[in-house]
Image (cartoon, rainbow, N blue to C red):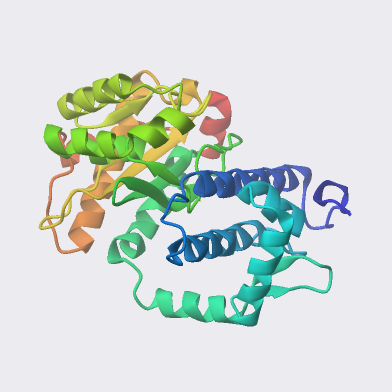
Amino acid sequence: MSDDNRPMHSGVGPDELGRMRMRGKILRRSASFNVAHAIDDLEPGTGAQSIQRALTLLNLVGLISSERSCGASLSEIAAISGRPKPSVHRMLHALIAMGYVERLDEGGYRLGVQSQILGQLAQKSVDPLVTESESSLLRLAELTQDTVFLTLRTGSYSICARREEGFGEIFNNALAVGDRHPLGIGAGSLAILAELTSAEVDAQFEANAQILAEKYPKVSIDQLRDIIDQARIDGFVHNPGLFAQGSWAVAVPLRIRGSRPRAALSIASIADRITGPRVERLVALLRHEARAIAAALGSGADSGPGTARDDDSAFAELDLTAAEVDDER
């Protein structure tokens, strides 16, 4: 029985069911992104290619099965990975033999005990920035009723490390936790680039020139440079729906003293909610939380233009009650 044909649980309303289905679509799209960005041109015969492909499949199993009790099907894993079914089947069985994947009675695949143990071990060494940002993201999502993200830099890529949704009716599906994109794709990613020198920005665009041309043909590097230049003037990034249709965003960098630029906070929604005077209020809220995170990490680093009074005004002026949020819509 397909996901859409399963009976609705008595405790799940139509709105929440719709969001659950949307999350499933986001996860499948995220899996596709991550496969597209995987390096598959490693030198054959060294073993590196096999390791890369096995880890890509492991990632797919984790992403897809996280929202499905029946696990990830072989057909879907093969379709998203672009690998032949027999090849995927052999690799999955190797991962099963090592305990990283297990096959359910229904036929689907999910992460195995060894993967779960690795996850538990990883929790002991979670990046403090990710931990300290949790309360800030929750607060921003509650105050704005929009979707809030923490973006981290990993080499010449950025990754969505955290995502929190407001309780408003608008559900942003442009970015999911674990999504990997070349630096410059996404408001948070651009906010990180705006903190680098021009030479460093050039180096990142050069490193990602091929993937940008192949996977993001509608986005030009000149466009990205213009946004970065404006961000250096304004102290924040304003993305006018450049990367995902209908998804606008604002972002500010997280400036941690003694640390290279590697993180940003962003808020995404529809155009009507990321334009006009509301942009200034959202940016003030983002800066307030960026300062709070920096302080929690033992750094008083500045997060850009603006004062504590500006932040307080933003809290006072932004629509905070559910009734007011509904009136906006």
Q: Nearer the viewer, residue 43 or 305?
A: 43
Q: How many numbered circles does the render carry?
A: 0
The residue most toward the front is 45
Image point (63%, 75%), residue name: 94
Q: Closest to the observer: 241 or 199?
A: 199
Q: Position of residue 157 (x, y in %)?
A: 34, 46
Q: Residue at x 57, y 24 (%)?
A: 329
Query: Within the image, what quadrant is residue 99 found in?
Result: bottom right
Which percent across, then down, holds residue 264? 30, 45
Which residue occupies the foreground of this view, 97 or 199?
97
Q: Is residue 73 visible?
A: no
Can residue 201 be seen in this snapshot? yes
Residue 36 appears left or right of 28: left
Q: Is 84 drawn above or below residue 167 in the view shown?
A: below
Q: Is residue 24 left or right of residue 253?
A: right
Image quadrant where residue 298 sits: bottom left
| Residue at point 33%, 33% (across, down) | 209
Q: Of 74 and 310, which appears nearest the observer?
A: 74
Using the image, determine if residue 87 lies above or below residue 94. above
Classify residue 315 by image quadrant.
top left
Question: With respect to residue 37, does 104 lie above or below?
Answer: below
Query: Whole-percent x and y of residue 39?
Result: 44, 50
Residue 93: percent from left, percent from top: 68, 73
Q: If the image is split into quadrants, where does the N terminus sit?
A: bottom right
